[in-house]
Image: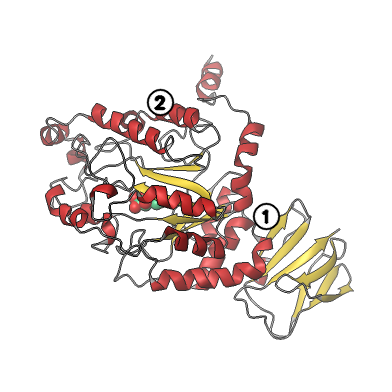
Amino acid sequence: MLIGNLAAYSQPKSITNETAEHKAARMKWFTDARFGMFIHWGLYALPGRHEWVKHRERFTTEQYQKYFNYFNPDLFDPKKWAKEAKAAGMKYAVLTTKHHEGFCLFDSKYTSYKSTNTPAKRDLVKEFVAAFRAEGIKIGFYYSLIDWHHPDFTIDRLHPQRERNKDEWSEKEKRDTAYYTNLNKGKDMSRYRKYLKDQVTELLTNYGKIDILWMDFSYPGAQGKGRNDWASTDLLKTVKKLQPNIIINNRLDLNDYTDGFDFETPEQVKPTALLEFKGKYWETCQTFSGSWGYYRDEHSWKTQRQLLDLLITSVANGGNLILNVGPTARGEFDYRANKALDSLSYWMHANSKSIYNCTYPPDQFTLPAEMNTRLTYNPNTGRLYVHLFSYPSNGKLVLPGYKDKIKYAQLLNDASEVEYTVVGSDIELKLPKEKQPYEVPVIEFITK
Ligand code: GLC
């Protein structure tokens, strides 16, 4: 009896009844692409101190209005952005059409809080789409479920007007619904829900084929918001109806449905944490520095080596990396972002074959952890890529047990042969004594 009940209970739920094969076909371009660009841009670029500034500094909507009035990105040229993304090897780009602050970068019928009403006077989303599409880059829209501007969006524990001088809530306060009921008099979430659906409909109707929808985010529980607040199942159905091939992330609070999302989104995790996602569809989202929106005085920028580690380790565990740029209020990538993108372009130009269309290799290809390598593999060509995070000082590298596994080796960057000798069941590579001018050199193996 009990067992029967449990089985019924754990039956996976589905919204669309899509088969695994159909999903795999729909996801193919995404898993082949491996590398994308995230773009966080909005009014928060003006204060230049984090995209959550309205929350952090508890701005009222009136206090925040100055950024709307002065938003004038005179150097905005999305064609330049698209060229930089392409040069860095990014195959898709996801732009914040609206972030938590509620400001819309597109000409929405449903609000006046939009870029066309600022001194910018432009539909920035439209220009982004045209420019990136022209470079052959797939188009993604980020849309914030949260909205700190909309008058019907109820005040909750993340809202700028949460009216407490602290961010830590006691359990009692979290349950103190009377407190919130009072704050939220006159607000009606069902009107916000309609707004949300109308805007998503606009975005998926007016800009042609959209490849990715990145919804952000749910925080169910006391004084939080989740699927009922967004009407997530209905929203998902609408999205699929408007754009049947779109790929959608996992932040609608529908994770108990097999098809409530297409990919997982480990955010700002260390490369070592990516192993656990092996075998799933996933994309890790990462910043160059500690913030998504432009942050002038934040200086903890990742090094080229850290960025490459994220990219290579993602692919080595069968996932994607989306790296974020936070353009300035004048509409440009700042000098630090440009430097980081240039360094990636340089590496990708020579080594991208170990990234695109690649994943983790079959089980027989492993190397001991102390060699500090990451392995990727292209299942179409059968080529194995060994990324050297440590370079052997004398150029001698032993691959234990590889005698019967490979038939040719070369450096990926210039296709120059790497000679080797067979010693027992091992092979001993003779790499150039001097490391090639790449932070992480790659050896390409033709496998048996
Ligand atoms: C977070 C943050 C946000 C950012 C996003 C990207 O959930 O709220 O500012 O847009 O992650 O993953």
Q: Nearer the viewer, residue 403 or 282?
A: 282
Q: Is residue 21 left or right of residue 272?
A: right
Q: Could you say which quadrant of the image residue 317 lies in?
A: bottom right
Tell me residue 198's x, y (percent).
Answer: 34, 31
Element at label 2: helix
**Does label 1 point to a residue whose CB lies under 8 Å from ligand 1?**
no
Q: How is the image coloured?
A: secondary structure
Of callouts 1 and 2, the N-terminal one: 2
Mark 1, residue position: 358
Circle 1 residues within 10 Å: few <14, some 14–19, many ≥20:
many
Residue 266, visible in the rendered structure: no
Give amino acid for label 2: Asp
Label ID, residue 234: 2
Element at label 1: loop
**Does label 2 point to a residue whose CB lies under 8 Å from ligand 1?**
no
Tell me residue 100's x, y (percent).
Answer: 29, 47
- Please give the name of the residue rendered at 45% of the width and 55% of the height, measured from the top-left corner: 38
Question: Dividing the image into 4 quarters, which one contains the C terminus?
Answer: bottom right
Give amino acid for label 1: Cys
Label ID, residue 146: none
Distance, label 1 to label 2, CA atoms, is 35 Å
